[in-house]
């Protein structure tokens, strides 16, 4: 291995082996945790088209009903819960999508570290895995030199250069790319570039492109996509992963040679494991000589925090996000109370960051008469707005930021030019010397620690004056780069009071899209914001009424409309008469409208709709009755027990199937006898769901009947019976799916 390649790999490991927590609540001494100490294997979901097979007992039904059931029950399938470690076993080229803070960049760094360390240890490139399909050749013991490229840097070069797509990535690496990696010497750059090119020619490069969505200009994003696709066409058989936020990716997606994986939120096990590892790592740093007491104390603190999170649905929702888990851990370390809304978490983080700066100022002679905390807050908001509006790569030079600060202090704070210039330099010197939310990225350029905090501060900036809100919404409402900002702005306004939150929702709706009458873009954006903010009941009810109208009037939009109410966020509020609009649809003669209404009611999670499925179970259409049974089960309402027991005797097998499943969710052992009877149902799908429900109830009196059911003539039933027996015997699956 050449000296320059060895130095490159060691530098890559040194720069990425630690978790960078500089921007997240550092009041006491800085903690430095390694990625190995806290890394949690993430899971992804992948789209998967599967042929739908009807159960035997329903194949004999008439063609119209069979086609209806195929359409309604054969929803597009996806694979979920796939470990991120399995990606390379399947394919060689991936797009990794995820929400803000979902762990995209961390996962790319993890892959780079794995590869670089193995390369150094063995003097051979790291074999990511044995693989199949179009992924690296099966059985290879060589390959894959990691090359990690932040796409904001590549995009900045593409904006200035006239490179052909096939040459763009290599031209970037040969020049500015290697300078960004810290190789200033031209001789070293030439030698290292030769190593990169050799790895690409031999199909031994692991290309990791981070942040495709961060390009503000759609043309630049398309050029970036073409550059990535071209380098793989020129140098096939290499591995490649491109990360992007979900929102923003569709503006210029990669081609069919790339497979798509979407990061899933932390499940309970991942969340718990994260806090156990994170707190233990922190406690080890706090102790001069870590011992068994360190581990015991860490476990006690982790158990306490996990219990607190699980007991609060709002905090548990936040803890599904890795970045927010980090913030929660740091807040808990400071002894503060955990907020239940993410915008409050961000606010607490910013407040503590500014407080940390105030502490630092007292120790520095050059910070006398510097900006106070309110001025610092306002300046950070102005910097965020400048970066978000004008800097596609989310960073700016020292002089650019100094000018932004000077102009803001003169115009908005009334300082004279000399004082403004002096205070701007004081602040930038503090940023340079003190780790924090706004960090020095090298080459006298600055940017925010994480794009999420830039977006939050931008949201605060555009809502400082009510008269500016309409201007910013008019300019940016339908731009993918601004969607997160607008949602955070709505949440920030709702924190002030419900009336202010309502005003922001109304402001969004004052800016309709040219195709608003067909696609309702502004309304749908307002509805997403509704899930983020506190508003008056009149506003929420009016939005819900409009949602119902569009849902029933435009069937082609029902998938898009359903997505709105299933988004995580605050609960929807509406008056009972609004939901009556859906209930009245049951009385219509069009089955499609009836079915749509039932599905919509099943998605809504407000107590007003709790009683509606009882009546639906008397509807003449079996599909509606099955949906109603499913809805009752999802709500786990014990009052539904008699109704569901009756539904278990319904003439329609699909209704009995849903009723059996729902009875398991109620966790009421009064259903055991009826479910044991359902194990002998004529329909195998009902017998299968009855076994599933008995396993869920974990009642030992069911074991005798379940053991007998292991002789069922249907394999799917026997499989569910075996799973149910294991649930009862062991309390949980030995190997969870």
Image: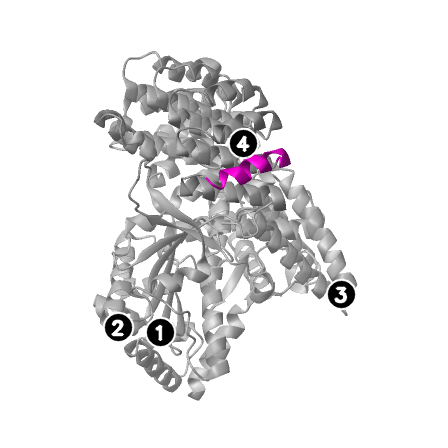
Task: Compute the Cα span from label 3 to label 1.
Answer: 41 Å
Q: Residue 1: x, y in percent?
A: 42, 87
Q: Nearer the viewer, mark 1 or mark 4?
A: 4
Residues at marks 1 and 4, CA–CA distance in whole angstroms: 51 Å
> Viewer-nearest of labels 3 and 1?
1
285 is higher (above) or lower (below) than 103: below
Spatial separation of the CA atoms under disc 2 and disc 4: 54 Å
For disc 2, the neighbor class at 10 Å (few under 14, some 14 to 19, many from 20) is some
Q: Which residues are magenta?
A: 699-711
Residue 54 seen:
yes
Q: Which mark is residue 205?
A: 1
Mark 3–mark 4 distance (CA, rounded to whole Å): 48 Å
Mark 3 residue crowding within 10 angstroms, few (<14) / some (14–19) / many (20+): few
Q: Which element carries disc 3, helix, strand or loop? A: loop
The answer to whether the residue labelled 3 contacts the one labelled 1, judged by CB atoms less than 8 Å apart, is no
**Location of residue 697 with respect to 614 vertically, above or below:** below
- How many marks are shown on the rendered structure? 4
Asked whether residue 355 is drawn in magenta, I would say no
Circle 2: element type: loop
- The answer for how far apart the CA atoms under marks 3 and 2 are is 50 Å
Query: What residue does disc 4 label?
Result: 664
Q: Earlier along the polypeptide chain: callout 3 or callout 4?
A: 3
| Position of residue 278 measured from the top left corner of the image (x, y, whole percent) | 63, 58
Pointer 3: what residue? 287
């Amino acid at each position: 291995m050449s000296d320059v390649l060895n130095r490159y790999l060691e530098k890559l490991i040194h720069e990425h082996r630690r978790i960078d927590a500089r921007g997240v609540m550092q009041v006491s001494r800085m903690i430095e945790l390694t990625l190995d100490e806290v890394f949690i294997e993430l899971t992804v979901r992948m789209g998967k088209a599967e042929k739908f097979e009807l159960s035997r007992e329903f194949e004999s039904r008439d063609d119209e009903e069979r086609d209806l059931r195929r359409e309604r029950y054969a929803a597009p399938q996806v694979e979920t819960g796939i470990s991120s470690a399995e990606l390379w076993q399947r394919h060689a080229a991936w797009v990794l999508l995820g929400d803000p803070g979902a762990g995209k960049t961390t996962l790319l760094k993890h892959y780079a570290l794995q590869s670089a360390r193995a390369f150094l240890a063995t003097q051979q490139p790291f074999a990511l895995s044995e693989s199949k399909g179009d992924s690296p050749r099966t059985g290879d013991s060589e390959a894959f030199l990691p090359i990690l490229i932040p796409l904001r840097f590549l995009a900045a070069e593409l904006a200035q250069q006239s490179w052909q797509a096939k040459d763009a990535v290599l031209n970037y690496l040969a020049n500015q790319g290697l300078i960004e990696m810290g190789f200033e010497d031209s001789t070293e750059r030439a030698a290292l570039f030769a190593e990169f090119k050799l790895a690409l020619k031999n199909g031994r490069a692991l290309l990791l492109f981070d942040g495709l969505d961060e390009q503000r200009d759609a043309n630049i994003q398309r050029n970036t996509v073409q550059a990535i696709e071209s380098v793989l066409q020129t140098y096939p058989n290499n591995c490649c992963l491109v990360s992007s936020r979900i929102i923003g990716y569709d503006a210029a997606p990669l081609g069919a040679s790339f497979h798509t994986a979407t990061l899933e939120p932390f499940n309970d096990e991942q969340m718990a494991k994260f806090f156990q590892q994170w707190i233990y790592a922190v406690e080890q740093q706090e102790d001069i000589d870590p011992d068994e007491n360190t581990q015991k104390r860490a476990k006690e603190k982790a158990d306490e925090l996990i219990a607190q999170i699980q007991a609060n649905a709002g905090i548990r929702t936040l803890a599904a996000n890795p970045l927010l888990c980090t913030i929660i851990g740091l807040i808990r370390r400071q002894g503060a109370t955990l907020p239940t809304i993410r915008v409050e978490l961000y606010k607490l983080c910013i407040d503590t960051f500014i407080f940390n700066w105030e502490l630092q100022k007292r120790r520095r002679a050059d910070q006398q008469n510097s900006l106070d905390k309110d001025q610092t807050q306002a300046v950070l908001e102005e910097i965020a707005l400048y970066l978000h509006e004008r800097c596609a790569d989310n960073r700016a030079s020292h002089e650019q930021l100094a000018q932004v600060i000077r102009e803001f202090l003169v115009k908005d704070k009334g300082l004279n030019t000399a004082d403004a210039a002096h205070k701007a330099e004081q602040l930038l010197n503090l940023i340079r010397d003190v780790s924090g939310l706004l960090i020095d990225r090298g080459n006298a350029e600055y940017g925010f620690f994480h794009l999420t905090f830039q977006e939050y501060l931008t949201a605060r900036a555009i809502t400082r004056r009510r008269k500016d809100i309409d201007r910013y919404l008019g300019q940016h409402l339908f731009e993918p780069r601004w969607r997160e900002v607008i949602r955070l702005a709505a949440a920030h306004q709702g924190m002030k009071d419900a009336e202010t939150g309502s005003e922001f929702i109304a402001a969004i709706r004052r800016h309709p899209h040219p195709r608003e009458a067909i696609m309702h873009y502004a309304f749908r954006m307002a509805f997403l914001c509704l899930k983020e903010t506190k508003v008056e009941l009149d506003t929420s009810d009016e939005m819900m009424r409009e949602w119902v109208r569009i849902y029933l009037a435009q069937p082609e939009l029902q998938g898009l409309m359903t997505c709105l109410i299933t988004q995580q966020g605050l609960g929807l509020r509406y008056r009972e008469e609004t939901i009556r609009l859906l209930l009245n649809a049951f009385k219509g003669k069009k089955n499609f409208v009836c079915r749509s209404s039932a599905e919509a009611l099943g998605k809504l999670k407000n107590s007003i709709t709790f009683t509606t499925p009882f009546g639906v179970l008397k509807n003449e259409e079996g599909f509606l009755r099955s949906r109603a049974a499913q809805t009752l089960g999802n709500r786990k309402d014990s009052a539904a027990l008699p109704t569901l027991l009756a539904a278990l005797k319904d003439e329609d097998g699909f209704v009995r199937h849903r009723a059996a499943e729902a009875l398991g969710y109620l966790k009421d052992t009064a259903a055991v006898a009826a479910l044991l009877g359902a194990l002998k149902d004529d329909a195998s799908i009902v017998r299968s769901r009855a076994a599933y429900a008995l396993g869920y109830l974990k009642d030992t009196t069911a074991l005798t009947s379940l053991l007998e059911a292991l002789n069922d003539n249907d394999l799917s039933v026997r499989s569910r019976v075996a799973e149910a027996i294991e649930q009862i015997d062991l309390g949980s699956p030995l190997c969870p799916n």
